[in-house]
Image (spheres, helix red, strand yellow):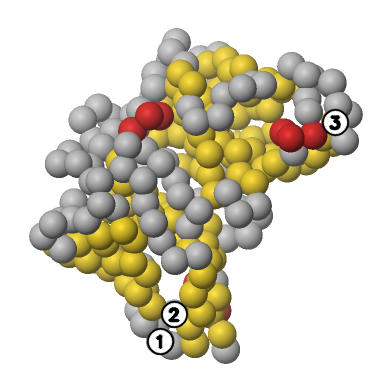
Amino acid sequence: NAGVTQTPKFQVLKTGQSMTLQCAQDMNHNSMYWYRQDPGMGLRLIYYSASEGTTDKGEVPNGYNVSRLNKREFSLRLESAAPSQTSVYFCASSEGASGYYNEQFFGPGTRLTVL
Amino acid sequence: LAKTTQPISMDSYEGQEVNITCSHNNIATNDYITWYQQFPSQGPRFIIQGYKTKVTNEVASLFIPADRKSSTLSLPRVSLSDTAVYYCLVARTNTGNQFYFGTGTSLTVIP
């Protein structure tokens, strides 16, 4: 099992460019998440998908869109990148069992720089 | 949404027991307490989860007092490889508005 995979690992964009970060999990999990991590800020949730076909905003959704393509894949799109979006992006997944919190499994991250 | 407060950083010598305390005064009845570990340039990794009293696994112990307003992660006999950031999370479900990762505690183990 590869767990949670993310592509690309590194990316440099110019202001105004667009790109999509890809995430896939092979654990048959229902829920998937996108976080950003800035120095000294911990992890902040951008969007999440509780189950296939649903998505919801997290703490910092502005400037991002997501697509839950199927149960395995959850992509994050930056339509017009800004320097403030320079960050490390993590994707995660969890079983998503209802009624209690269950552990999230994280990918290796994508380091994005916007010039 | 129960937010958490942890020390920003801690230092410890190799071989010592390390206790990291997390404060969560607004914890709700259905909330679980979960700890994650994050090494540089990696995603966080689940360590331990508990609801009350004491939970122990092969990596750590988690102590939760009766009022559940705080919890303590205990790492026995730390080694240099335990240098990482440790996050305390309080959550009742996996829905995005029901959990919160704080800024974590940066633990440095000194030889």
Placement of the C terminus of chain A among the 4 image quadrants: top right
- The amino acid beneath tag 1 is Gln
- The chain that hosts pointer 3 is A
Give me the disc on residue A58. none
Q: Is residue A38 above or below residue A31?
A: below
Residue beneath disc 1: B16
* Residue reaching furthest to the top: A53
- The amino acid beneath tag 3 is Leu
* Element marked by disc 3: strand
Choose between A101 and B57: the one closer to the eye: A101
Tell me which corner region of the image, top left, top right, bottom left or bottom right, holds residue B59. Answer: bottom left
First in residue order: circle 1 vs circle 2: 1
Residue beneath disc 2: B78
Give me the disc on residue A13. 3
Q: Is residue A112 above or below residue A98?
A: below
Q: Residue at x 88, y 29 (%)?
A: A14
Q: Is residue B70 left or right of residue A90?
A: left
Disc 3 to disc 1, how far (Cα)? Answer: 45 Å
Q: Is residue A113 left or right of residue A91?
A: right
Choose between B86 and A72: the one closer to the eye: B86
Q: Position of residue B66 (x, y in %)?
A: 11, 60
Choose between A18 and A62: the one closer to the eye: A62
* Element marked by disc 1: loop
* Element marked by disc 2: loop
Q: Residue at x 29, y 53 (%)?
A: B24
- The chain that hosts pointer 2 is B
Q: Residues within 10 Å of mark 3 (few under 14, many from 20)?
A: some
Inspect this view and state whether residue A9 appears: no
Q: Position of residue B108 (x, y in %)?
A: 55, 75
